[in-house]
Image (tube, rainbow, N blue to C red):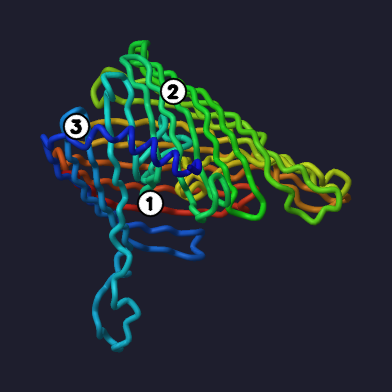
Amino acid sequence: MSKKLFVVAVAMVLLGTIAYAELQNVEVGGKIRIRGSWLDYDNDSDIVWTEQRTRLNVKADFTDEVTAFIELDSYDIWGEDFRSRDYVTGVDSRQVSTDDVEVYQAYIEAREMWGTPLRLRVGRQEMTLGSGWLVGTNDKRYNFTGLSWDAVRLGYVSDTVTVDAFMAKLAENFSDFFEDDVDFYGVYGSYTGLEDIVIDAYWLYLRDDAVRYKADLHTVGLRGAGKVGAFDFEAEVAYQFGDKDDCTWWIFGVDRDFNAWGVNLEVGYTFDISWQPRVYAGFAYLEGDDYDCKWFDVDEYDYAFNRLFSNWEYSDFLDDGGILTNAFVYRLGVGVQPTEAIKLGLEGQYYVLDEDIVRGCLWWRESNDELGWEIQLTGAYQYSEDLVFRAGYSHFFGEEVLEDLDFNYLFAETEISF
């Protein structure tokens, strides 16, 4: 029996207990989220679009702590699926709507297996680790397409300790086990024995064997979060190591390594007065690549910190999808709640490069590291328990590296859950 068949056989045995489970409860739910956006890049080009994500799920609970969950979703841009056969000119390239509805989640979960604290989830599923700083669901700001994983996740769950081990398939090329695919593995542990505080430790491994130049990226990290009186905090530090195959023309070869640190911090304080104002400060360090372009020192290259599948976005302009790295990010903000239904927030960020941008040659060299700063104003109105309206505006003031460019972003959205 091959290793791949062995894994499938083990999963079937572990899930064999559901064969005689009886259906106890069925729940139907979903979400509709619609956002209109206007993005202006220094008056050079404006982009206006409306995006909509529709989700519908069914959850079936069986005896013996067994659950089946299926969720369908569709992410669309308004106007891309208009089904007219003849409008204005009679030539409509958008007559047919295809590939809209996807199986976003579909998994089987068994809890307290054989009377133990074991939990098993097999199938396509969302995963958010910690605050989502490195692994999240891609639904933070615009382009909220969602992110789910084809994975097996085995967990140990007790009152104070939770440990999850998972393996996910990101790309399948139908080769032998561990060949020509992209896989993602991890072990994530949490301790909740301290009141209102969680302490996490983890190891993540991204293995890319699908391209010509193979890569192995390991990430180890620690996280602490919680509340102490009126203070709240979020602190996470991660170190990445690994290597990538040589992929350059240099005759001596290039040692390309993953060797970078990442830090994410936030501390807040909530005043027990009218409007319940919360002030907070945040800091992020995302180490840049280490590379000297001198011809005699071209044989070493360390990649910048990789944000992996982050759900944190530090900017509406520089960080779409959690791509920002090689940077220091400084944040200050305040949030208030004038009524039970209304929340307002104001945040400012300042961005500086870790590794400077160098322009010029030996007799004229200039190093620049300031990207700029950004302000964000957001508001939310909870119309009912299920329906919320949100709006916001952001402005970016470019500095040295971005040559004093100014960007604007404005959005309005609504979301209903049922």
Q: Earlier in the sequence, mark 1 or mark 2?
A: 1
Nearer mark to the viewer, of 3 and 1: 1
Residue type marked 2: Gly
| Residue at the spot of label 3 | 339
| Residue at the spot of label 2 | 189
- The answer to which of 107 and 359 lies nearer the viewer is 107
* Mark 1: secondary structure: loop
Q: Earlier in the sequence, mark 2 or mark 3?
A: 2
- Callout 3 touching callout 1 (CB < 8 Å): no
Q: How many marks?
A: 3
Residue 142, numbered circle: 1
Identified at 38% across, 51% down, the residue is 142
* Left or right of 246 on screen, residue 338: left
Identified at 31% across, 69% down, the residue is 98
Question: What crowding class fits label 3: few (fewer than 14 Cα within 10 Å), some (14-19), or many (20 or more)?
Answer: few
Whether residue 13 is visible here, answered yes or no, is: yes
Please state the horizontal and vertical placement of residue 61, each as a whole percent of the image.
17, 35
Nearer mark to the viewer, of 2 and 3: 2
Please state the horizontal and vertical placement of residue 166, each as a whole percent of the image.
43, 34
Q: Residue furthest front?
A: 1
Whether residue 231 is visible here, answered yes or no, is: no
- The answer to which of 102 and 142 lies nearer the viewer is 102
Q: Residue furthest left?
A: 24
What is the spatial separation of the Cα atoms under label 3 and label 1, in whole angstroms? 27 Å
